[in-house]
């Protein structure tokens, strides 16, 4: 058991040497000025996919929210505990985030559980199934249009439809909608293919996912008002 932790401690020592024993460390500014990220990412808890690693980011670059299947709930004014919504509010309203990026991936266990209706086995029954209800519109679309596809293909499609559904849910937050209208915030839906190692972005004009790359019309694609 302890050897699982050993690798973490080695990693921590390397991190400390790189960022805290160097006088010009970026942490000097991050401590003095506080965090000022321009990008908020909503990613899955999946251990294989860390947006900061995929995008080559440094500490302070990304404000990251992670949950099962990178879902966004709709805006709800009730007295429940809304972890994702609270983090969204802090990022958008207090930090002045410019881009909210949904960061999905293929082979998502949450999406697979939704498609297979996998019974939950641990004692705390109900948390995952309840949470995955947020992706029900994506599930319904796949059932209606793609029921003959393999599970692998249905998982990929369901993940993509779920991203589009989460984009819609993001727009139900009044302080996000207001900033979209004033062009202060832009929304994006990205999906990482774990098998191909390819990152795709949803293009609202063509209603398709296309590979993210620094192409000629890069500004048109990523400055487009959503
Ligand atoms: Zn996932």
Image (cartoon, rainbow, N blue to C red):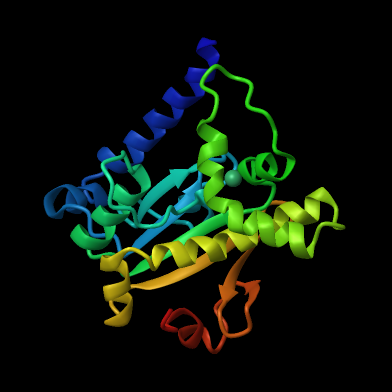
Q: Is residue 176 above or below residue 4?
A: below
Q: Is residue 17 above or below residue 10?
A: below
Tell which residue pokes out farthest to the front in this image. 78
Tell which residue pokes out farthest to the top in this image. 1
Q: How many marks?
A: 0
Name the spot of residue 63 as percent of width and height, x first.
Answer: 34, 53
Report whether residue 175 is seen.
yes
Report whether residue 197 is seen.
no
Considering depth in this image, is 9 or 114 the residue closer to the camera? 114
- Say left or right for 107 vs 93: right
Figure quadrant of residue 169:
bottom left
- Say left or right for 3 vs 225: right
Residue found 64% across the figure and 72% down from its top = 211
Quarter of the image where ligand 1 sits? top right
Considering depth in this image, is 75 or 219 the residue closer to the camera? 75
Name the spot of residue 11 as percent of width and height, x first.
Answer: 44, 31
Q: Quadrant of the N terminus?
A: top right
Name the spot of residue 193 as percent of width and height, x first.
Answer: 68, 57
Considering depth in this image, is 91 or 81 the residue closer to the camera? 81
Name the spot of residue 120 as percent of width and height, x first.
Answer: 63, 26
Residue found 26% across the figure and 52% down from its top = 26
Q: Quadrant of the C terminus?
A: bottom left
Q: Is residue 152 above or below residue 116?
A: below
Considering depth in this image, is 219 or 165 the residue closer to the camera? 165
């Amino acid at each position: 058991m302890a050897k699982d932790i050993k690798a973490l401690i080695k990693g921590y020592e390397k991190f400390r040497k790189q960022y805290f024993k160097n006088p010009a460390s970026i942490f000097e500014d991050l401590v003095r000025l506080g965090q000022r990220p321009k990008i908020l990412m909503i990613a899955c808890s999946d251990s294989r996919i860390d947006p900061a690693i995929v995008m080559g980011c440094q500490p302070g670059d990304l404000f990251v929210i992670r949950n099962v299947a990178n879902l966004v709930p709709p805006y709800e004014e009730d007295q429940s505990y809304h972890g994702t919504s609270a983090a969204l509010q802090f990022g958008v309203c207090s930090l002045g985030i410019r881009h909210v990026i949904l960061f999905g991936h293929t082979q998502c266990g949450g999406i697979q559980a939704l498609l297979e209706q996998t019974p939950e086995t641990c004692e705390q029954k109900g948390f995952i199934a309840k949470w995955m209800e947020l992706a029900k519109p994506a599930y319904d679309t796949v059932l209606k249009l793609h029921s003959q596809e393999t599970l692998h293909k249905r998982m990929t499609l369901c993940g993509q439809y779920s991203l589009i559904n989460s984009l819609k849910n993001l727009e139900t937050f009044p302080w996000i909608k207001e900033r979209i209208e004033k062009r202060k915030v832009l929304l994006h839906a990205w999906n990482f293919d774990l098998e191909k190692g390819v990152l795709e972005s949803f293009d609202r004009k063509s209603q398709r996912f296309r590979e993210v790359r620094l192409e000629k019309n890069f500004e048109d694609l990523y400055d487009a008002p959503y």
